[in-house]
Amino acid sequence: MSEGGCLCGKVRIKSTGEVLAKALCHCADCRKISGSTYSTNIIVAGDGFSVTKGMPKDFSKKADSGNTSTSYFCGDCGSTLWSASETFAKVIKAGVMDSASAIGDAKPATELYASKRVPWVSAVAGAEQWKAMPESATV
């Protein structure tokens, strides 16, 4: 079981389900959501995911894939905790997890939108490199 929450502590989440994938995403949306050059994500099944405290706000947007992606964040401190779409069940932002080991265990097996990676960030050794989403070509 992994637990996490936003910076101010008003929204808390828990994941008890199987980790389906671990991925970095270099798309423009993930850059904006994370405030960084990419996001580190833990993809879990929806049935093992729950909000244990608070009520997050949400923002929906059509992603590059054409699917609608919804980001869930704390309305007070602004921390993005997870996103969901028609393609993925729950995409937890690894940095919101409480345990340092949960974050360490989030080493990605896949990099999405690797073709958009900033030039000073290296590819993760051994991770699959996708041009966009998994149904796209590899780089």
Image (spheres, helix red, strand yellow):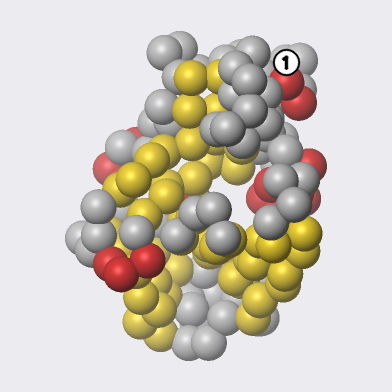
Residue 86 picture quarter:
bottom right
Report whether residue 114 is seen: no
The residue drawn where x is 64% and y is 65% is: 71
Counting from the top left corner in percent of width and height, residue 28 is at 78, 42
- Which of these two is toward me, 20 or 107? 20
Q: Circle 1 sits on which residue?
A: 120
Quadrant of the rendering where the C terminus is positioned: top right
Give the tally of numbered discs. 1
Counting from the top left corner in percent of width and height, residue 123 is at 57, 15
In the image, residue 65 above or below residue 73: above
The residue drawn where x is 60% and y is 24% is: 130
State the SS at label 1.
loop
Q: Is residue 20 rendered to the left or right of residue 26?
A: left
Residues packed near mark 1 inside 10 Å, few (<14), some (14 to 19) or many (20 plus): few
Counting from the top left corner in percent of width and height, residue 13 is at 39, 71
- Which of these two is toward me, 36 or 22? 22
Residue type at numbered disc 1:
Trp
The residue drawn where x is 58% and y is 61% is: 85
Quadrant of the rendering where the N terminus is positioned: bottom left
Q: Residue furthest bottom?
A: 54
Report whether residue 34 is seen: yes
